[in-house]
Image (cartoon, rainbow, N blue to C red):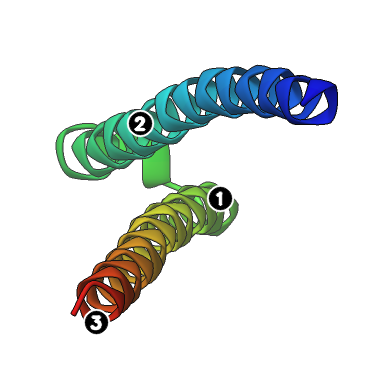
């Protein structure tokens, strides 16, 4: 019985730690997504309304490099969110289906 109580306490401690880490990861993902959106908006604004920022070929290349880097980062974070959502939904479905089959 003591082994079960010890196992339960360890499990609860681990569950709380995972829950806290999950909260921080969600916050970090949202912050990164928002920063990429803000950078893209600022770069497009700069390209459209401040033509002196792209007077030389080097400055134009730098602007386009940062714009493409931010777009790639935005796509990466969006794809990561879609993949995580898909995996979690699939696992939830399989778990639910397994429980309903075993109850019959």
- Residue under the image location 38 percent in, 29 percent down: 35
Question: Residue 101: which disc?
Answer: 3
| Pointer 3 or 2: first along the chain | 2
Question: Residue 77: which disc?
Answer: none
Residue position for label 1? 62
- The residue nearer to you, when weighing 81 against 92, is 92
Secondary structure beneath dot 1 equals helix
Placement of the C terminus among the 4 image quadrants: bottom left
Q: CA distance from mark 3 to mark 1?
A: 58 Å
- Residue under the image location 20 percent in, 73 percent down: 100
- Residue under the image location 31 percent in, 30 percent down: 34
Q: Is residue 97 left or right of residue 76?
A: left
Q: CA distance from mark 1 to mark 2?
A: 26 Å
Secondary structure beneath dot 2 equals helix
- Expressed as whole percent of the image width and height from the top left, the position of residue 29 reads 44, 35
- Residue under the image location 36 percent in, 61 percent down: 88
Q: Toward which corner of the image does residue 39 lie, by quadrant?
A: top left
Above/below status of 24 relative to 53 = above
- Expressed as whole percent of the image width and height from the top left, the position of residue 22 reads 51, 30
Placement of the N terminus among the 4 image quadrants: top right
| Pointer 3 or 1: first along the chain | 1
| Pointer 1 or 2: first along the chain | 2
Q: Is residue 80 left or right of residue 48?
A: right
Residue position for label 2? 30
Q: Toward which corner of the image does residue 12 lie, by quadrant?
A: top right
């Amino acid at each position: 019985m003591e082994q079960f109580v010890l196992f339960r306490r360890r499990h609860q401690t681990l569950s709380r730690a995972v829950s806290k880490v999950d909260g921080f990861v969600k916050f970090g993902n949202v912050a990164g997504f928002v920063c990429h959106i803000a950078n893209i908006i600022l770069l497009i604004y700069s390209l459209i309304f401040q033509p002196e920022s792209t007077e030389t070929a080097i400055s134009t290349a730098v602007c386009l490099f940062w714009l493409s880097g931010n777009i790639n980062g935005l796509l990466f974070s969006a794809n990561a969110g879609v993949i995580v959502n898909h995996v979690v939904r699939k696992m939830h479905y399989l778990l639910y289906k397994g429980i309903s089959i075993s109850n019959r």
